[in-house]
Image (cartoon, grey):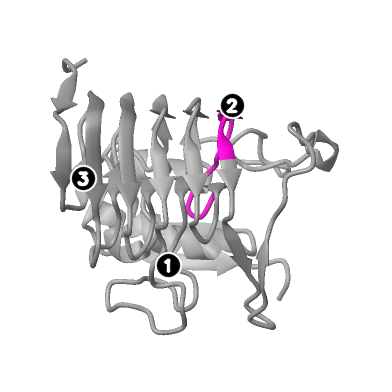
Amino acid sequence: MLGPRWSCAGTYKEDVLVNKKLTLSGHDAFIDATGLENGIQVVASHVSVRGFTIKNANGEGILVGVDAPSDEHLLPASGPILDHVTIDDNDVLNNNKGFNGTEMPNCKYPGDCGGGIHFNVTTHSVASGNTVNGNSDGIVLTDDYGPSSYNVVEHNVVDDNLIRSRVTDTRTDATVRRRIVDATYMASRVPATDPPPFEVNDGTTCVPVGALTSVAKPPAGYVIIGAGKTGDRCRVSAPRSGHSTRRHHLDPRS
């Protein structure tokens, strides 16, 4: 583990990329990301970010992972799932400046450039003690290209973050009525945590999509089984080997 890195008092006009394990601590440190994509982006495991005020990014205030296939090369060669990332005691204010119908060129998604704190494909990570105000989204956990599990969000103050409907363009301020939301009734099952529901012949390598990037020796071809995001994730993950391979997609919907 690398030692801590401190940022002294002052305003830093930059988009910070953390691509190695470390503890990044701010002391009266402001990151003004005006005109930039993100305030801080973490693309490594075992990282801690604390004590910063991050504001005015076109996209995310703090992004853990990537939010577009074009940035997939930033992720570790060992695989896309980031673990043990802690985001605590930060003020994340007035980001997602592209959320106004006239997005800046580096806004990845028209009408929604990001939000306050975004964990994308993480495990055993924590967002705690942050103030998240005036962004498009508050604190978001997503599984765009792999599983997201065993994360903790606690003791944050999240308010005045707008939600935009992509259907009607209506913008709504979500008011928190409960401190704890129990979503276990959904009983989600994903390939990363469950064995295949079909027989796999001896000698056949069968991995969940999130583990594609960790396959040491690229095979001559892939057979992708699944619908929904599975095909999209495979298009992101499989080319990381640098080899040209054949791919067949078995979609149960077709």
What amino acid is labelled 2 in the image?
His
Dot label at residue 113: 1
Residue 149 lies within the magenta run = yes
> Disc 2 vs disc 3: which is toward the camera?
2
Question: Alpha carbon of mark 2 to alpha carbon of mark 3: how far?
Answer: 26 Å
What amino acid is labelled 3 in the image?
Leu
Question: Alpha carbon of mark 3 to alpha carbon of mark 1: how far?
Answer: 18 Å
What amino acid is labelled 1 in the image?
Cys
Horizontal and vertical percent position of residue 159: 60, 48
Mark 3 and mark 1 in contact? Answer it, CB < 8 Å. no
Task: Tell me the SS state at disc 3.
Answer: strand
Q: Is residue 133 left or right of residue 242?
A: right
Dot label at residue 17: 3
Residue 207 lies within the magenta run = no
Task: Specify the segment rendered in magenta.
Answer: 142-157
Q: Which residue is mark 2?
A: 155
